[in-house]
Image: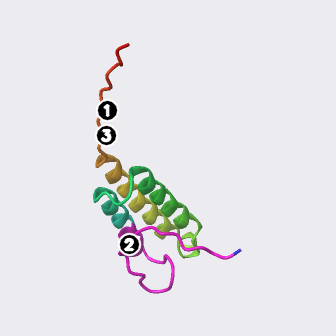
C-alpha cells in the first residue's frame, strides 16, 4: 500500500528530512491549522480532525517515538493549539423560525 500525503496546512515549509521530523514543524503546522480556521478557510470540525491526526502522526512517527522527550513536547504543542482552537470557536446564531399559520 502506497503512503499518501495528507494535507495539514498550506504554508509550512519542510525543514530537514522529508516528512515530520522536528518540533518546529509540528508547531508550524498546528499554527497554520488554527490560522486557516480563523480565516474561514476550513471549518471547526476539519481543524480539530487535523490536530487529532497530527497527534496520531507524532505517536507513530519514528523520529518522535524513539525520543520520548520529543514526543511528549510534540503532544504538548498539539494540545496547546487544540485549546486555542476551542477558545476561538464562535457559536452560530440560531435562526428563529416562525410557525406557519394555517
**Residue 47 or 100: which is nearer the viewer?**
100
Q: On the image, numbered disc 3 is attached to which residue? A: 91
Residue extending furthest toward the bottom: 16
Question: Which of the 4 quarters of the picture holds residue 30?
Answer: bottom left
- What whole-number distance in Å separates the C-alpha atoms at marks 2 and 3? 26 Å
In the image, residue 40 sits, relative to residue 20, either above or below, namely above
Give the percent coordinates (x, y) of residue 20. 49, 76
Circle 2: is it few (<14), some (14-19), or many (20+) Cα within 10 Å? Answer: few
Q: Secondary structure beneath disc 2?
A: loop
Q: On the image, numbered disc 1 is attached to which residue? A: 94
- What whole-number distance in Å separates the C-alpha atoms at marks 1 and 3? 9 Å
Which region is colored magenta?
A: 2-29
- Residue name at image x 31 percent, y 32 percent: 94
Residue 64 circle label: none
- Residue name at image x 44 percent, y 53 percent: 48
Give the percent coordinates (x, y) of residue 65. 57, 69
Most frequent secondary structure within the magenta stretch: loop
Circle 3: is it few (<14), some (14-19), or many (20+) Cα within 10 Å? Answer: few
Q: On the image, numbered disc 2 is attached to which residue? A: 10
The stretch drawn in magenta includes residue 101: no
- Residue name at image x 38 percent, y 13 percent: 102
User: Left or right: where does residue 95 sit relative to residue 15?
Assistant: left
Give the total number of marks visible in the rendering: 3
Depth check, mark 1 against mark 2: the one in front is 1
- Residue name at image x 46 percent, y 60 percent: 50
Callout 1–callout 3 Cβ contact below 8 Å: no
Q: Quadrant of the N terminus?
A: bottom right
In the image, residue 83 sits, relative to residue 15, either above or below, namely above
Residue extending furthest toward the top: 102
Amino acid at each position: 500500500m502506497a503512503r499518501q500525503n495528507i494535507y495539514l496546512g498550506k504554508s509550512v515549509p519542510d525543514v530537514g528530512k522529508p516528512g515530520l521530523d522536528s518540533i518546529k514543524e509540528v508547531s508550524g503546522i498546528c499554527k497554520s491549522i488554527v490560522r486557516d480556521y480563523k480565516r474561514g478557510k476550513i471549518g471547526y470540525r476539519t481543524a480539530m480532525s487535523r490536530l487529532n491526526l497530527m497527534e496520531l502522526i507524532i505517536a507513530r512517527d519514528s523520529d518522535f517515538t524513539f525520543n520520548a522527550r520529543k514526543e511528549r513536547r510534540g503532544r504538548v504543542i498539539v494540545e496547546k493549539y487544540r485549546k486555542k482552537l476551542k477558545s476561538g470557536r464562535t457559536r452560530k446564531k440560531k435562526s428563529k423560525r416562525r410557525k406557519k399559520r394555517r
